Amino acid sequence: MSIQLKTVNVGIILSLLFILILGAVPVNGAILTTYVKEAEFLTQLQVLSTGMDLNKEVTSLQFVTYLEDLVNGRGSDVLVNLTSQVTLPETPISYQEALTIAGIFMGYSRDSSYSKVRDLTPDLTKKDQDHLTGYEMTYICYQLLHTRREGQQVLLLEERYIVGSNPKIVDKAIDIKDSQLILDENGGIFHLAKDVQAFVLSGEEIQPVSLSRIVLGMAEVKLFFDQTGQVKTVVSTAGYSPSRIRVLLSQELDQLGGSKSYDFSEIQIKATQPFKIVVFKDGVEETELVAEKNEVITFTNQDGQVRFITQNGKVTRLIAGRVYLKSYYSHTICFDPLLSSPRRGNVPVYAGVLEIFPSEKTGYLNLVNELPLEMYLRKVVPGQIPSSWPKETFKVQAIAARSYAITQINRGKFKDYSAHVDDSTASQIYNNIVEVPEINEAIAETEGVVALHSGQVIDAVYFSTSPGFTANNEEVWHSYLDNHFPGISVPYLRSISLVPYNPTLNLDTEAKALAFFKNQSTGGYDSSSPYYRWMIELTREELENTINQNLPLRKKADTIQGTDFVRCLQGYNLNPDDTGFTIGQLQDLRVVQRGAGGNIMILDIVGSYGTYRVMKEYNIRYVLRPNQEETGSTDEVIIQTHDGGEVINYPILPSAFAAFEIIRNLQNEIEKVKIYGGGMGHGVGLSQWGMKGLALEGSTYEEILKHFYQGITLEKIY
């Protein structure tokens, strides 16, 4: 064997509490790829680091290192330190060696270790000399976490991960400040240890979660402290109720519904009905002011504190920390239309509670709206689909939006703002259009209903229009575990046909792809959408301009995210900070790979100065932005749509479901390119216009949801 270890007494290693993945943050939901669940679990447990290529073989040193991290856990003492005894550390570890070492770590005898760990890992069927991949290593580690150490009464996690003493229960926690403080709603402040970790307890089952999931909305939170009095472990002892949501509000939305900023230099709140401004001091709610009907209160950040002043200037307060605006009625607080950011010309009216607190940006404020999830949906669904559509579409959209919101709550994307979601397309556009009674009725009729797959609420992503087929999720998004593209398959986010007479799609040549996207008569459930088919014509110079401008921008975003999806294959280096970057003369646009639904996954841009590869649909759409500002056109750039209309200067390519018709001169130089495409949006999950087509043909909301999200069930969870 390539690993030799001295006999070590590891009988003192204690074992852990049973762990089951219940609502853990998914890569993109429930997963098809083997052992991804285990990798996610270990990543959340902070044993496995993100970015490791888990498809590669594991070396002897890597395996022993991860086993040591697993067993030592979060205890103050080191139980195992065996890495120095590894011989041939860079040699790939064999299946037999790995199981033997794992058994020794669990306190088994050397003779019995292999057979016992083999019995613990029945899904791993390999020959003794086979090598292990990173994913297979995570499966072994995961199974050990479900097993008692030799001679122990508990499982390893409880002993080595649920650590600390003097437990204290607090009510709903809402914020982490600078990763050092945890604030409960009644004003309690607790210092966090640097290695603080969070868990959710449900009956006898426990799972590691991001701290943000505990902090933002969990009830009955139990804190365990280290010897210095800092919070070492956080455990939610009650089931999480997803019936409320915290929304980070944007100062302004852009043309596509993206947030321009979450930082407000000034917030003006108008009382359509009386509301009170409250703070918490030593756990007691104190009312600072009652705003009368039609009174306007102005909030600013003064030296890191919240300052508010009444309209007549008679009342001024300076508050350290958060200020809460609570009303006596369900709909009472709105932004003043003169000094805030109306959405689509409407003055947003907010239900629930508004929280104002200093931003990390000096001199600015952030604003969070907490409200019941069902009220949130009343202000989301109208912004997604027209109110003239069939009622079944309202129900479909409500269930999809509710399911999606719950997965976002679990992910903690906006934890730094003490919010679950924002009000832009980064989550779901919220409060951009006034409520619609018919839509509210559909929401009420499906109250608490979500889509489930394998017992978990699904990541119910949706988009505007398909070209007749949707996309597989892994052919649109990468895996955050190892930054690999294509990503990890999600069983309910499969490419499906929305063309009744054509259940399959064959675009194995670019000629076929071009013919498909040029065909205006392709009948499909989405065909009433203006974007079912579209065409853009750009000169070579216009394309060069938009590529030269946007390729470095996407490379910069790529670098910030630690990925490599925009790259130079040969030629002039792609420097994200090079303002003078150019591809030279555009020579070709080559589609390297398409997804099952016809979407471009990888595009090579060939210029006289180099060849550049762009991967993933959003990067491709961004690099080819078809608007006058990007292209430098003398005239406006026009998208010709399926209904005979025209869209001027659209900020991004409508979708990556497209093909290129390249027109060349006698010298074989590109003169212009016609981009024929179909659909709008990323193409994964539910197509809204396809949903409409199915509803018009008599499909029920349940049938529609099960058509788009394969293998799901619907369940009322509250």
Image: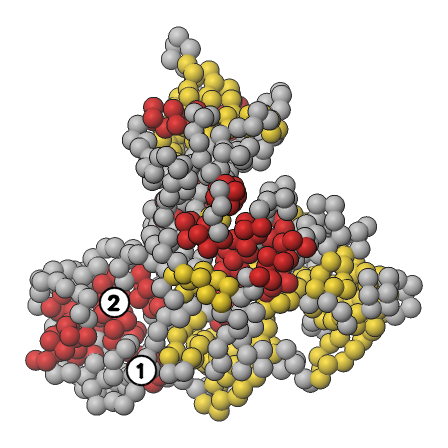
Residue drawn at the location 59% of the way across and 23% of the way down: 633
Q: Within 10 Å of the Cα at label 2, are there few (<14), some (14-19), or many (20+) other Cα atoms?
A: many
Q: Amino acid at mark 1?
A: Leu
In the rendered structure, the answer to whether residue 571 lies left or right of residue 15 reads right
Q: Within 10 Å of the Cα at label 1, are there few (<14), some (14-19), or many (20+) other Cα atoms?
A: many
Residue in the foreground of this view, choosing between 403 and 606: 403
Residue drawn at the location 54% of the way across and 35% of the way down: 529
Q: Which residue is mark 1?
A: 16
Where is residue 230? Give x, y as percent.
Answer: 51, 83
Name the secondary structure under disc 1.
loop
Where is residue 579? Give x, y as percent.
Answer: 53, 34
Where is residue 429? Give x, y as percent.
Answer: 60, 52
Q: Amino acid at mark 2?
A: Tyr
> In terms of image quadrants, where is residue 611?
top left
In the rendered structure, the answer to whether residue 44 lies left or right of residue 304 reads left
The quadrant of the rendering that contains the N terminus is: bottom left
For residue 561, say whether it is visible.
no
Residue in the foreground of this view, choosing between 521 and 424: 521
Among numbered discs 1 and 2, the one appearing first in the sequence: 1
Name the secondary structure under disc 2.
helix
Q: Which residue is mark 2?
A: 139
Residue drawn at the location 50% of the way across and 25% of the way down: 535
In the rendered structure, the answer to whether residue 206 lies left or right of residue 96 reads right
Residue drawn at the location 81% of the way across and 50% of the way down: 338
- In this rendering, the answer to whether 379 lies above or below 715 is above
For residue 437, say whether it is visible.
yes
Residue in the foreground of this view, choosing between 340 and 679: 679
